[in-house]
Image (cartoon, rainbow, N blue to C red):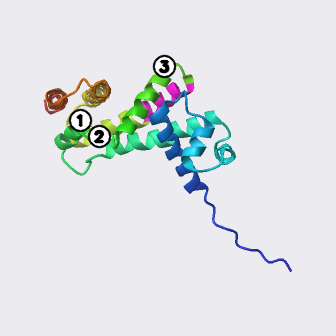
Amino acid sequence: MTVNKIGRPSKAKERIGQILRAAHSVVAADGFASTTLSRVAAAAGVQRTLVLHYFGSRDGLMQAFVTDAVAAYGDAQLRLGTEGPIDDRVNRMFAPGAYETHDDLVVWSELVHLAVRDHAVRQCLRQLWTERWLPELERQLADAFPTAPPDRVAVTAYGLACLFEAHWAFHLQEVVDPVRTEQAIRAAHILLAALEL
């Protein structure tokens, strides 16, 4: 008679998350070009072979990092303050905490830079923007301004995304101060006001 023994519960989900968090810290510290499986494994406190087991290669790890980790914090930004009025939510886009940490902003900047030369990363970011982030922003604006025409909602969503991206890129270049932040917020509210016409 064969007795089925219950094995240990899988730690795959936990380990994958641990490795992706380590990849985030390595990319933030050293950039994508210097991110190796060995560095990520060391940062995660696991063997390099375990990283290979879960991701197959450095490219596999970087692809998972972009599609899972980066997509998740982009989604989190879109949920920031969704329980409040749209004006408050727009203000939060330009306040500390829009990127949870400075490292998140550094990683995002690294990723945008990488997309210039890496077709796969560029495709992934394009897909995130066109199929996930911009449509979600449009949905939120349409909910807040139900009488606004869809084309005006789409224009406003794109304008807000461009303003947000440029503001935080300037932030990394230290071209930011309270006056500049207030200017960005005012510009965002000018865009929003067009939805009320």
Looking at the image, residue 13 sits to the left or right of residue 93; the answer is: right
Q: Disc 1 versus disc 2: distance between alpha carbons?
A: 6 Å
The residue pinned by badge 2 equals 98
Disc 1 target residue: 94
Q: Residue type at mark 2? A: Ala
The answer to whether residue 3 is seen in the rendering is: yes
Q: Is residue 125 magenta?
A: yes
**C-alpha gap between disc 1 and disc 3:** 25 Å
Look at 68% across and 40% down and name the residue there. 56
- Give how far across and how far down residue 47 sits, in percent: 65, 48
Quarter of the figure that contains the N terminus: bottom right
At x 30%, y 29%, the residue is: 168
SS majority, magenta: helix
What distance separates the C-alpha of mark 2 from that of mark 3? 24 Å
Query: Mark 1 belongs to which amino acid?
Result: Phe
Dot 3 falls on a residue whose secondary structure is loop
Percent from the top left, x then y, of residue 197? 13, 29
Which stretch is magenta?
120-131
Crowd class of label 2 (few under 14; some 14 to 19; many from 20; radius 10 Å) = many
Is there CB contact under 8 Å for labels 1 and 3? no
Q: Is residue 196 left or right of residue 157?
A: left
Q: Is residue 155 above or below residue 11?
A: above
Could you tell me which residue is drawn at 55 percent across and 29 percent down?
34
- Disc 3 designates what residue? 116
Does the magenta run of residues contain 88? no
Q: Nearer the viewer, residue 75 or 28?
A: 28
Q: Is residue 122 above or below residue 20?
A: above
Which element carries disc 1, helix, strand or loop?
A: loop
Residue nearest the viewer, comparing 47 with 191: 47
Say which of 149 and 144 sits in front: 144
